[in-house]
Image (cartoon, helix red, strand yellow):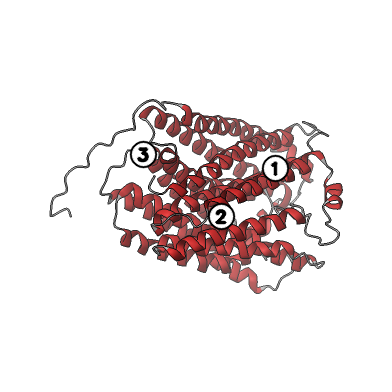
């Protein structure tokens, strides 16, 4: 570890992993409630479990992004973090606010929670993914502003690199777009129109910049490829991500009362959205093939390559499957949407956070380069268990969605919703089994931090010599 202030990333990473475990536990509860309707009812109703599952996902990814920024920015800027104390203070503010919000979901009826937190004074609650009380949203803004100030001042006083500037643009976009969470018009069309400015433009816009910057940083460290080469790739990737992602917001406007031209704009540009993810996959493998060093952290390399592949499959391929308006007319809101959402979030954002944690945590814990071989073997087992099980979760939900669309929406004699749900129950059971395997993989990921800690760092075998002709 080159700079002492990078140590503030460690609590952020630990909190992210802890909240990730909680998110998956509630995911398993939700999966069981699909097939055992009264499971944990009335203690944890389905709507509450879903709120906790999705909100924990967003919060732990934000913790991961913040930790990644606090780790890589000092190294990129070649200077200490502007204010480590502010970073630690905001960590506790964010963690306590998040914990109290989740406890509020679990212990208080949602309507009562809205009344207790003054939602009538500034109504912002009740919308999917933005269920947080207004007071929590204000806390998120305060944390985000302090975080941006800390990161921005660090970059200003140090070296400016493409990686840190792209990361900063993504982080500023994340903060600015969240402000639309406070805009809650009475008109439902306007409400959904601007709601997507948070939800879509986060995950299919500025978050992609954050993802690209983190991946570029890790690949620079792991491969030793010239920074200029990686930066050129990064420019092209983020340009494609913004061009396709911003106009591609239109694929959410198909059926909410907006003008018909959005069906064309949304279809065309969202059909192009797989391109930046495909480019990211090619980028990752190309950099690894051109590497000048054989870094001993094999697990981090595996996560980095896996990020590109799974992001392309989940966000790219599965997104394209139902993004064209004539197809989306039948698939909108079906289990095909859930299939896309699960693999896209895992491939693009879960895996990039685990990539930076895999690279940085050994250094933050006093290692010179990487964890021991035994620890990395456990971590790579966790990678394969989580990744393969997520593929199966996606396939099972896709099967459920195809059958759901056929029986409920497309056939000449459509069946009622609940009748269809009974007929696709087998897919839900298989999804739950795959979810259990995923959770086992996550437990292994946590366990690898405690395996082989007294053993020496993994060693790297030298790369074969490159002849002048090959160079």
Say which mark, if any, is on residue 59: none
Taking depth in this image into account, of 335 and 127 the one nearest to the observer is: 127
Q: Which residue is more in the foreground, 144 or 262? A: 144
Whichever of labels 3 and 2 marks the residue nearer the N terminus, that label is 3
CA gap, disc 2 and disc 1: 32 Å
Task: Give the number of the disc on residue 99.
Answer: 1
Taking depth in this image into account, of 322 and 61 the one nearest to the observer is 61
Q: Secondary structure at mark 2?
A: helix
Could you say where residue 2 lies in the image, as x and y percent from the top left?
A: 38, 48
Does any portion of residue 252 appear in the rendered image? no
Task: Bin the neighbour count of mark 2 within 10 Å (Cα to Cα): few under 14, some 14-19, many 20 and up.
Answer: many
- Tell me the residue that label 3 is attached to: 297
Element at label 1: helix
How far separated are the C-alphas under marks 3 and 2?
32 Å
Q: Nearer the viewer, mark 3 or mark 1?
A: 1
Instruction: Give the label on residue 319, or none.
Output: 2
Residue 25, x across and y down, in percent: 65, 34
Q: Give the mark toward the camera: 2 or 1.
A: 1
Ranked by sequence position, the earlier of labels 3 and 1 is 1
């Amino acid at each position: 570890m080159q700079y002492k202030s990078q140590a503030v990333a460690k609590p952020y990473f630990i909190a992210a992993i802890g909240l990730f475990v909680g998110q998956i536990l509630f995911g398993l509860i939700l999966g069981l409630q699909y097939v055992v309707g009264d499971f944990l009812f009335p203690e944890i109703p389905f709507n509450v479990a879903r709120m906790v599952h999705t909100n924990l996902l967003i919060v732990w990814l934000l913790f991961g992004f913040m930790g990644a920024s606090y780790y890589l920015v000092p190294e990129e800027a070649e200077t200490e973090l502007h204010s480590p104390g502010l970073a630690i203070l905001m960590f506790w503010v964010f963690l306590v606010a998040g914990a109290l919000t989740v406890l509020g979901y679990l212990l208080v009826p949602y309507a009562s929670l809205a009344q207790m937190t003054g939602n009538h004074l500034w109504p912002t609650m009740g919308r999917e993914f933005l269920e947080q009380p207004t007071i929590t949203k204000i806390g998120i803004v305060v944390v985000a502003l302090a975080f941006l100030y800390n990161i921005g001042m660090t970059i200003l006083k140090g070296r400016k690199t493409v990686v840190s500037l792209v990361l900063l643009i993504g982080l500023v976009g994340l903060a600015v777009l969240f402000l639309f969470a406070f805009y809650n018009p009475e008109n439902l069309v306007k409400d959904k129109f601007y709601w997507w400015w948070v939800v879509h433009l986060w995950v299919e816009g500025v978050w992609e910049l954050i993802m690209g910057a983190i991946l570029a940083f890790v690949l620079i460290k792991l491969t030793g490829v010239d920074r200029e080469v990686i930066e050129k790739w990064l420019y092209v990737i983020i340009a494609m991500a913004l061009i396709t992602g911003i106009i591609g917001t239109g694929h959410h406007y198909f059926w909410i009362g907006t003008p018909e031209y959005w069906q064309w704009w949304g279809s065309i540009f969202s059909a192009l959205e797989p391109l930046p993810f495909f480019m990211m996959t090619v980028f990752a493998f190309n950099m690894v093939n051109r590497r000048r060093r054989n870094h001993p952290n094999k697990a981090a390399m595996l996560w980095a390559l896996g990020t590109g592949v799974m992001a392309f499959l989940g966000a790219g391929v599965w997104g394209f499957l139902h993004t064209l308006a004539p197809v989306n007319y039948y698939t909108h809101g079906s289990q095909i949407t859930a299939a896309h959402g699960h693999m896209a979030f895992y491939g693009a954002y879960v895996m990039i956070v685990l990539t930076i944690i895999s690279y940085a945590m050994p250094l933050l814990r006093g290692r010179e380069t990487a964890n021991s071989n035994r620890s990395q073997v456990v971590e790579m087992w966790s990678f394969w268990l989580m990744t393969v099980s997520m593929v199966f979760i996606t396939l099972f939900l896709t099967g459920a969605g195809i059958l759901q669309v056929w029986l409920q929406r497309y056939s000449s004699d459509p069946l009622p919703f609940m009748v269809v749900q009974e007929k696709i129950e087998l897919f839900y059971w298989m999804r739950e089994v795959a979810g259990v395997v995923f959770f086992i993989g996550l437990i292994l990921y946590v366990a690898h931090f405690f395996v082989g800690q007294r053993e020496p760092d993994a060693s790297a075998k030298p790369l074969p010599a490159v002849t002048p002709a090959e160079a």
